[in-house]
Amino acid sequence: MKPEPGLPDMVFAANAAVVVEGRVFGSLFLAPERRPESVPYESWFKAEGYEVHYPESVCEGEGDLVPAGRWILAGTGFRTTRRAHREVQEFFGVPVIGLTLVDPYFYHLDTALFVLDEENIAYYPEAFSPGSREVLARLYPDAVLATREDAMAFGLNSVSDGRHVFVSPGATALTARLADRGYVPVPVDLSEFHKAGGGIKCCTQEIRS
């Protein structure tokens, strides 16, 4: 992506869209100053041959929409709306499981949860409402649970290919738990980006063809 003057948060590419099976559901940011970011990303997708669906309600891409095998985990509470969850389900034809975030520090779902592989996730339970914690416990009884210290270090703003996990080096307990489960942690220091509220996943837009 070519950077655009005056749009420093473009570095957080995950927020621009969510792509499933080659279909692109774009973004409508809550903050007015971020809304112009949608335009250059839309142009990039179109130049690459993708059609882009425009959300009718606030929706911040993979920040709050996390494809997880047979369904999409969808966060709400601070940015993306429940109405957007319904839009996403209708557009992709994939079940969308809404999860409510309750801690303002974890403003996007991808700061409190990430997908390890087709069957499992890692997450910080206290970032979610009681009902959402129950849902996650039922769906993922063998999930890797993170401490608050791990989560505050952006340990859950990670990216996994199913074996290797690109993770913040500050999330030491989480890194050890991942290794115990057979994953290969790959520490990546993006601490400068933490100052703007993002980490590894925030800077990564996954193109699922």
Image (tube, rainbow, N blue to C red):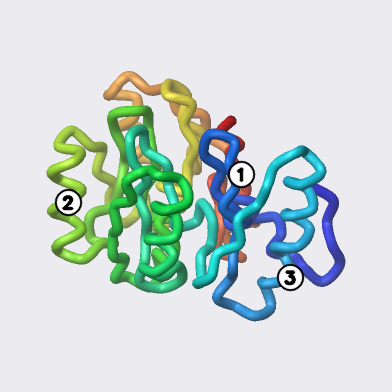
Task: Check disc 1 and report its element: helix, strand or loop.
Answer: loop
Identified by mark 2, the residue type is Val
Q: Residues within 10 Å of mark 2 (few under 14, many from 20)?
A: some
Q: Residue at x 59, y 36 (%)?
A: 22
> Residue under circle 2?
135
Question: Which of the 4 image quadrants contains residue 138?
Answer: top left
Q: Earlier in the sequence, mark 1 or mark 3?
A: 3
- Classify the position of the C terminus by image quarter: top right
Q: Earlier in the sequence, mark 3 or mark 2?
A: 3
- Evaluate if marks 3 and 2 touch, with contact meaning CB atoms under 8 Å apart: no
The spot of residue 88 in percent (x, y) is: 44, 55
Question: Which mark is drawn over residue 59?
Answer: none
Task: Classify 44 as above or below 108.
Answer: above
Task: Classify 4 as above or below 58.
Answer: above
Identified by mark 3, the residue type is Pro
Question: Which mark is drawn over residue 205?
Answer: 1
Residue nearest the viewer, comparing 208 with 153: 208
The spot of residue 171 in percent (x, y) is: 41, 44
Task: Check disc 3 and report its element: helix, strand or loop.
Answer: helix
- Evaluate if marks 1 and 3 touch, with contact meaning CB atoms under 8 Å apart: no
Q: Earlier in the sequence, mark 1 or mark 2?
A: 2
Q: Residues within 10 Å of mark 1 (few under 14, many from 20)?
A: some
Identified by mark 1, the residue type is Gln
Q: Residue at x 15, y 64 (%)?
A: 130
> Residue under circle 3?
36
Residue 179 in sight here: yes
Q: Residue at x 51, y 51 (%)?
A: 62
The spot of residue 61 in percent (x, y) is: 54, 56
Task: Check disc 2 and report its element: helix, strand or loop.
Answer: helix
Left or right? Give the position of 187 relative to 144: right
Left or right? Give the position of 62 relative to 141: right
Cα separation, mark 3 vs mark 2, equals 35 Å
